[in-house]
Image: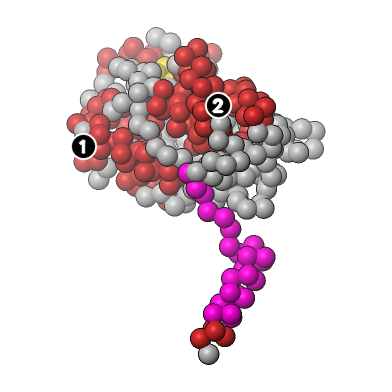
Amino acid sequence: MASKEISFAFSIIFILLISGFVSAQLSTNFYASSCPQALQIIKSTVNAAVNNEKRMGASLLRLHFHDCFVDGCDGSILLDDTPTFLGEKTAFPNVNSVRGFDVIDTIKANVENACPQVVSCADIVAVAARDSVVALGGPYWSVPLGRRDSLTANFSQANTDLPAPQSNLTRLISAFAKKGLNANEMVALSGAHTIGQARCISYRNRIYNDTNIDSSFASTLKVNCSISSTDDNNLAPLDTVTPTNFDNYYYKNLLVEKGLLHSDQELYNGNFTDAQVNFYAHNSGKFFKDFSNAIIKMGNISPLTGTQGEIRLNCRRIN
């Protein structure tokens, strides 16, 4: 009787496998045998790019976030538009904003030279984000790997699911919850804004209309971000104190009403998230730990695995 039950169980597992209901899981040693050089190649290429331009570290981190929040971490954001294909790059949250594609291209070319058609673009984006954070003084985490690349993109979801810089706390929590991330994880991941810059169009309304903003801070920003639209692309650091260091100054700035974006200051504005912001402002170790755990979880949003998708030869187009 027992042998029949075991045989039946194995039959069910086999049926599930061939039906696609059981997919491969991500693993931190996914390329240990197939491309052992991959992680070092990505790291060295990222380090060179960040050494050349510190801002690139923030751009590569943001690229991972904007990829994962649209149909999962599948490299879809990397796809270029064609006459018959609409990608995500021209969606409002991405156009003239998301960058770093040339660095991903370089990494992909270097990895392809070592291990042809083995390492996915989606995995490259995830590892490049980690290596960028480390290069700027932030925490290290082991990146689960084994994602495959999408065959399509989702322009409409890029417009609806990526949180806007004008979002209030309720909308932020809702946007992250939609991706399986809770409010605490949202606050931790928002700490990515301790590096990088934002365009005037993203913070203009805050510096001219918000009341929960330090007046001298707002006045300084108004110099390069006028009320007119002529300054839309002028940049300001998200963290004015240590703009190229991955640390906890983002949260310290919120305590004194110097969050650049409206969505930033919403985390410390008389809400239940105030306590977490205050804790991170005084405990960088806890922030680093929670950020690492949250970004690992974010990196596991709906990955393509097994035989799903493909391994692109060029990250900008499907094979």
Location of residue 113 in the rendering, given as x and y in whole percent from the top left corner? 67, 27
**Vertically, is 40 above or below 220?**
below
Q: 113 and 124: which one is in front? A: 113
Location of residue 74 in the rendering, given as x and y in whole percent from the top left corner? 59, 43
Report the side of 285 relative to 113 (left or right).
Answer: left
Residue 294 in view, yes or no = yes
Type of residue at label 2? Ile
Estimate the spatial distance between the alpha carbons at disc 2 and disc 1, rounded to whole Å: 36 Å
Q: Is residue 102 magenta?
A: no
Location of residue 271 in the rendering, given as x and y in whole percent from the top left corner? 25, 43
Report the side of 60 relative to 95 (left or right).
Answer: left
**Vertically, is 77 above or below 144?**
above
Q: Quadrant of residue 217?
A: top left
Q: Residue 279 bears which disc, if any?
A: 1
Judged from the image, the secondary structure of the residue bearing numbered disc 2 is: helix
**Vertically, is 15 above or below 127?**
below
User: Which part of the image, by quadrant, shows the C terminus?
Assistant: top right
**Residue bearing the label numbered 2:** 41
Mark 2 or mark 1, earlier in chain: 2
Q: Which residue is drawn at 48% across and 31% down?
A: 129
Judged from the image, the secondary structure of the residue bearing numbered disc 1 is: helix
For the record, the magenta segment spans: 6-28
Report the side of 203 relative to 311 (left or right).
Answer: left
Q: Residue at x 47, y 51 (%)?
A: 178
Q: Quadrant of residue 124?
A: top right
**Vertically, is 77 above or below 239?**
below
Q: Residue 29 bears which disc, if any?
A: none
Location of residue 284 in the rendering, given as x and y in whole percent from the top left corner? 25, 31
Q: 179 and 47: which one is in front? A: 47
Task: Decide: few, some or many residues near mark 1? Use Cα within 10 Å; few <14, some 14-19, many ≥20.
Answer: some
